[in-house]
Image (tube, rainbow, N blue to C red):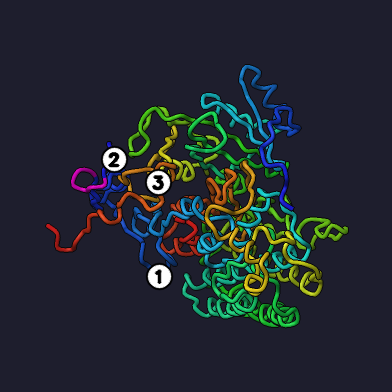
């Protein structure tokens, strides 16, 4: 019973009610959408992300007032070509209309991705001013992918310690780590 | 900083020199800093909260996560769609079976698989048993944290019956890992035994335990004084802070994925022959304090009981796996040793370079877990393992409102609020 349709369909003229409203409100933006398994994903450029998100929450036709999740994906070596190396994914839902929408924005790193340096290109405007609940999710994205959020009130790592030498969910970070455990300094009680 | 794993060249960890402590929380004047956790009986597992106190009043609280971080999402990229159930089961270990159902619900959304009616009923019963399991612990722990050990044991005792049922079905009482893509690990071994066990639990044991808990707590002056008007979250705040589950419903948010985005037997026409969705009510409270959360959970226990009651005598016959050729799950061991087809099928699934065709795409599947929306965002690349699995852990998202709930309250209210959020550290840190 596995569906024969294996590739995602490009469907710019999808009938998700939100898409029309967004297109009307932002005629100058180049937006596109994909549909897979009945779920609509809106692709927004990084610069326009913040205003589009605010519109999606505030416009009565969209009313996507619930930010379900913020996460990121690393497409290094992904079999289908993507517009960028990283994607930040926002899962939105509407409490009143019971609709869902995924918003995605792509980023490209400007430097080596193996370390834990701050990349000036891997930065997105925060949505914590629209949904305060994004605070910890954005911190986790930073912790795991090194994507920072401009305007975030507390941009620190959340699960790993603050100078962990890599961003572990990037695809160039090996599953078993790079020996952090073996080389970790042991703090002794009687250390001077 | 260039990459280095040698501490001499790079990083130091000095607990006293961590910048955020210096910047925001300083001893001095009338205020002092208290480190709460990570090892403390009231933190349940390993939660650490740094508190700034003014007398006994909490001025500021900063939670620290990560003590149990074990890279579950990274592991998901190296386990196939069936294997990974063993990992995610360890997230919310209070009700592991709900994790199993949630993960394979998301996987089946990705594959576009429609389950058989029998599988849907069994999964719905299991998901509701998981909800009962979770809420029994939570309402008990709410009392435990406030010093009422008896109430905790009333609930905890009955959880043992659910473990017995899972043990009977899957041979493992704590982490059954019972679901597979498009089906279950195995069919119910004996329908009569299963029905008797579940009936005994929902008709005899559960009502008795709930009566005990309610008699002990619902009109208990000490308990009510400790939880009423403590940790209030309004409806607007609950939505803005992405709260879900009983926490949001106690604040008046009308959102339950079982009603809003129905799946399994919560959906009309689930058996393809016009069966109605199971009937249940979603309890909503409006005040948003710890007492409301406790009451909402109690009522959800009753509703879960009602759902199981409708289904347990009407489990349809027929196969439990949606794929009759068993392409997506390991065939039974007896068949593997007895027939060449099953042997081939077994190898096809076990060999790391084989597996079955998977789609290329991204989708999100969520169910209403006991603590809220439990969802998985899966990116599939056509291989045997997902490209990326992102969890939406309700504990993590609910826990970030924790400081907002009790800042300004007394220190002793902290444990009352913590108990009412029901944060599960393994899911928090993953």
Q: Position of residue B369 (x, y in %)?
A: 62, 59
Q: Which residue is mark 3?
A: A168
Residue B161 lies, with reference to residue B287, above or below; the image says below
Outermost residue, left side? A192
What element does badge 2 sit on? loop
How many other residues sit within 10 Å of disc 2, few (<14), some (14-19) or many (≥20)? some
Asked if marks 3 and 1 fall on the same chain, the answer is no
Asked if marks 1 and 2 fall on the same chain, the answer is yes
Give the letter of the chain under mark 3. A
Q: Position of residue B166 (x, y in %)?
A: 62, 74
Q: Which residue is mark 2?
A: B3
Q: Which residue is mark 1?
A: B41
Q: Residue at x 42, y 59 (%)?
A: B410
Outermost residue, front side? B340
Q: Magenta segment, principal secondary structure?
A: loop
Mark 3 or 1: in front is 3
Mark 1 or 2: in front is 2
């Amino acid at each position: 019973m596995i569906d024969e349709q294996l590739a995602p369909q490009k469907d710019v003229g999808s009938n998700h009610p939100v898409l029309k409203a967004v297109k009307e409100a932002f005629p100058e933006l180049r937006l596109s959408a994909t549909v897979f398994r009945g779920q609509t994903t809106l692709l927004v450029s990084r610069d326009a992300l913040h205003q589009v998100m605010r519109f999606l929450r505030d416009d009565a036709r969209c009313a996507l007032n619930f930010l379900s999740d913020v996460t990121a994906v690393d497409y290094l070596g992904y079999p289908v070509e993507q517009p960028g190396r990283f994607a930040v994914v926002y899962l939105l839902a509407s409490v009143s209309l019971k609709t869902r929408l995924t918003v995605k924005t792509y980023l490209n790193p400007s430097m080596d991705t193996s370390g834990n340096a701050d990349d000036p290109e891997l930065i997105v405007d925060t949505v914590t001013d629209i949904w305060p609940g994004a605070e910890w999710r954005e911190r986790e994205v930073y912790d795991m992918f090194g994507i920072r959020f401009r305007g975030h009130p507390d941009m620190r790592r959340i699960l790993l310690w603050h100078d962990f030498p890599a961003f572990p969910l990037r695809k160039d970070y090996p599953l078993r780590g790079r020996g952090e455990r073996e080389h970790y300094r042991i703090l002794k009680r009687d250390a001077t | 900083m260039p990459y280095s794993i040698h501490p001499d060249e790079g990083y130091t960890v000095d607990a006293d020199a961590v910048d955020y402590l210096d910047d925001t929380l300083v001893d001095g004047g009338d205020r002092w800093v208290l480190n709460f956790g990570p090892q403390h009986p009231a933190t349940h597992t390993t939660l650490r909260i740094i508190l700034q106190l003014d007398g006994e009043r909490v001025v500021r609280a900063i939670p620290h996560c990560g003590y149990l971080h074990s890279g579950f999402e990274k592991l998901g990229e190296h386990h196939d769609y069936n294997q990974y159930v063993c990992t995610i089961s360890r997230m919310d270990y209070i009700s592991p079976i709900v994790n199993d159902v949630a993960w394979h619900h998301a996987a089946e959304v990705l594959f576009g698989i429609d389950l058989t009616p029998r599988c849907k009923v069994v999964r719905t019963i299991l998901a509701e048993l998981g909800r009962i399991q979770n809420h029994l612990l939570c309402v008990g722990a709410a009392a435990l944290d406030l010093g009422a050990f008896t109430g905790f044991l009333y609930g905890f005792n009955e959880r043992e019956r659910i473990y017995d049922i899972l043990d009977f079905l899957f041979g493992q009482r704590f982490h059954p890992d019972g679901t597979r893509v498009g089906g279950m690990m195995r069919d119910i071994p004996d329908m009569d035994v299963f029905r008797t066990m579940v009936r005994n639990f929902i008709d005899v044991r559960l009502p008795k335990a709930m009566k005990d808990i309610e008699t002990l707590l619902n009109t208990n002056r000490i308990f009510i004084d400790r939880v009423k008007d403590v940790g209030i979250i309004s409806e607007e705040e609950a939505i803005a802070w992405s709260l879900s589950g009983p926490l949001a419903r106690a604040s008046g948010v009308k959102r339950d994925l079982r009603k809003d985005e129905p799946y399994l037997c919560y959906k009309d026409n689930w058996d393809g022959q016009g069966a109605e969705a199971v009937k249940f009510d979603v309890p909503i409270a409006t005040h948003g304090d710890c007492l409301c959360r406790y009451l909402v959970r109690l009522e959800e226990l009753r509703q879960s009981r009602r759902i199981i009651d409708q289904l347990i005598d009407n489990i349809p016959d027929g196969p439990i796996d949606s794929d009759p050729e068993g392409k997506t799950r390991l065939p039974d061991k007896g068949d593997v040793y007895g027939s060449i087809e099953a042997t081939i099928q077994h190898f096809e699934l076990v060999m790391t370079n084989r597996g079955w065709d998977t789609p290329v795409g991204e989708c999100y599947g969520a169910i209403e877990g006991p603590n809220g929306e439990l969802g998985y965002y899966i990116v599939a690349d056509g291989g045997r393992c997902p490209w990326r699995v992102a969890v939406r852990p309700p504990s993590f998202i609910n826990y970030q409102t924790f400081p907002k709930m009790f800042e300004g309250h007394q220190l002793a209210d902290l444990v009352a609020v913590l108990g009412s959020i029901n944060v599960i550290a393994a899911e928090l840190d993953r």
